[in-house]
Amino acid sequence: MKVSTREKKVLYAGIVLAVAIMIYYAATLFSPGDGESLAEKVNTQESLLRRQKEFIGREDFYKKFIEESENDITKIQTRLLPGNSPSGAATELHRILSDFAEDSGVVITQRNNQPERKVADSESLTKVSVRIGVDCQLDTLVDFLIAIKNYDKFLKVEELLINTALQQKQLALRRPLYMIVAGYISTPLPDESTTKPGENTTQASSSITR
């Protein structure tokens, strides 16, 4: 293939430009420029190398930190309600409260599930709550609340509504009392690789029309 004179000029110009760029790069790298000398560049590289060595030297510390964090997560998960279904967790929560009520002499008169809510700053925790009405005396109410607090799963009395009345110059509870008790479950994170809603339907429709 014969190269024309114009093409030769373009090729020579490209070579000259490439050489000029290389010379400029070498000059800025190995000579003082932008307020940084070669010695300063060497010091910067040595500083980065020291930091890398320090990080490698603390490898055991980071391994231990990760193991402790994993153990903490495992302990927290053991205190969650079983399963990852809000409806199933609400059923379990009702069963737990019924057992506590029977043991402490409290009568549950009303039961209502509350809307589940995602826990703030957590993508995997969901709060499941139930609202109950109870008929009891003050001492049995205390036993009921203590049983909730000491349970091996993490339960929380979020709201307690007590009405009182003055009877024969004594303060008495007006029943029923109402409270909201919450537990927590771990819900799976959304899988980005799963098919988007409607995608399968679209593909099925297109295949039918073919």
Image (cartoon, grey):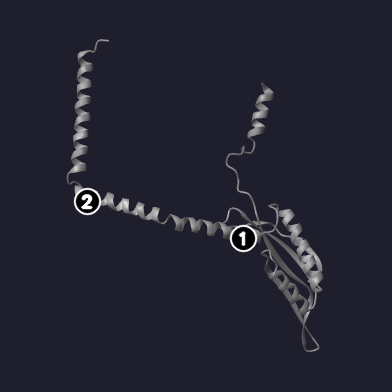
Q: Relative to the observer, which residue lies in front, 42 or 14?
A: 42
Residues at circles 2 and 1 in contact by the CB criterion of under 8 Å? no
In the picture, the quarter occupied by the N terminus is top left
Rendered-image quadrant of the C terminus: top right
| Kind of residue sitting beneath label 1 | Ile
Q: Residue at x 21, y 29 (%)?
A: 17
Q: Decide if residue 35 is in sight here.
A: no
Going from N to C along the chain, the mark reached first, 2 or 1, is 2
Residue 70 pos. (x, y %): 56, 56
Task: Provide the residue designation for mark 2.
Answer: 40
Residue furthest to the top in view is 1
Question: Residue 104 at what x, y percent from top left?
Answer: 79, 73
Amino acid type, mark 2: Glu
- Relative to 84, say whether 164 is above or below: below
Determine the secondary structure under disc 2.
helix
Horizontal side of 30 relative to 164 (left or right) equals left
Residue 76, numbered circle? 1
